Image (cartoon, rainbow, N blue to C red):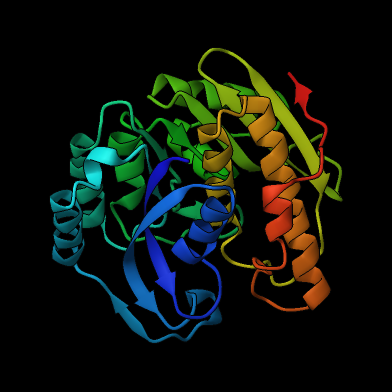
Amino acid sequence: MKQILSIQSHVAFGYVGNRAAVFPLQRLGHEVTAINTVQFSNHTGYGEWTGEVFSAAHIEAVIDGLGARGVLDRTDALLTGYLGDPAVGDIILALRERLPEKAVWLCDPVMGDVGRGFFVRPGIPDYFRDRALSRATIITPNQFELEYLTGRTITTLDDARMAARAAHEMGPDTVLLTSLIHEDTKSDEIQMLASSASGAQYLVTTPLLPLDPAPNGAGDCTSALFLAHLLSDASLDQALSKTASSILALFEKTMALKRRELNLIGAQDAFADPAPLSVQRL
C-alpha cells in the first residue's frame, strides 16, 4: 500500500476529478488523501452547475494542515489533474518541493482535446509545458495535449513515438498517451501508447465504443489506474495492459446502463482484477 495525495476537482454527483480517481486507487489497495480544488453539484459538461471554486489560499491552507499532521512526509505519490486556476499550479510546484525526494508526481496536463481545442484558462497550457513537465515523473496527455507540449503534429504511429521521446527530454520518465488515433488506426479502434525514458515503448489497441456523449472523467480514472499499477510494482507494459483493460470494461458497463455518468462502482472488479489484454512492444 502506498500513500497518494490527489489534488483535483470534486463533484457531488457523477464521477470526474477526485470522484473518478480516489475510488479506483483505493480499490487497488492504496491510501488516498484528497484535496478538492472545487466543489460543484455536477461536472460542467452539463452546461449548468452550482458550487464554487476554492481559492488558492484555501488549498494552500489545507496543504499546510496536512503538513502539520505529517502527511506530506509520508507521501509516496502526488496525482494532479484539471487546474481551474493557474495559481493552483504554483501551489502544486511548491508542494512538490515539500514531498520526499523519492515521491513520484503523475501530472495529467488537462487543457484541451482534438476537435475542441483548449478549454482551460489562459496561462495553464504554458504552465504545463514550461514549468510542470520538468518536475513531473509521469504525464498522461491525450493526443492534442502531447502535440502542444512537444510542438509536434501526430499523424502516424512514428510521430506519436517521437513526440513521446521529445516529452521525455522535457523531464518525465514515463509518458502515457491516453487516446491515440493515427492514420493506420482502424475506424472502430483507439490506442494507448506507453513510453519510458529508457527507450521502451508499448502500444495497446481497444475497441472504440459508440458512447454519445462520451462520459466525462475517463481520463481522470485512467491516470489513477495507471499510477496505482506502477506503484504496485507493475512493469510499464503490465500497467498499460491493466489500465486499458479496466477502462474498456468501465466503458462497456457504462454503455449497459445507458447513462452519461461513468459506471465506476459497477466496474470495480475490473479495476481490481482486469482481464488480460495483449500489448505490442514497439
> Is 238 located above or below residue 43 in the figure?
above
Say if residue 211 shows up in the picture. Answer: no
Residue 202, picture quadrant: top right
Q: Is residue 209 left or right of residue 232?
A: right
Q: Residue 109, percent across and down?
A: 43, 46
Viewer-nearest residue: 257 or 215: 257
Where residue 112 sits in the image (x, y, percent)? Answer: 49, 54
Q: Is residue 127 left or right of residue 259?
A: left
Residue lying at 75% horizontally and 46% vertically, measured from the top left: 274
Q: Is residue 220 visible?
A: yes
Tell which of 193 and 74 is nearer to you: 74
Q: Is residue 62 above or below residue 157?
A: below
Q: How far across and how far down the image is residue 13, in percent?
A: 52, 80
The answer to whether residue 224 is left or right of residue 261 is left
Image mark count: 0
Residue under the point 60% across and 52% down: 114
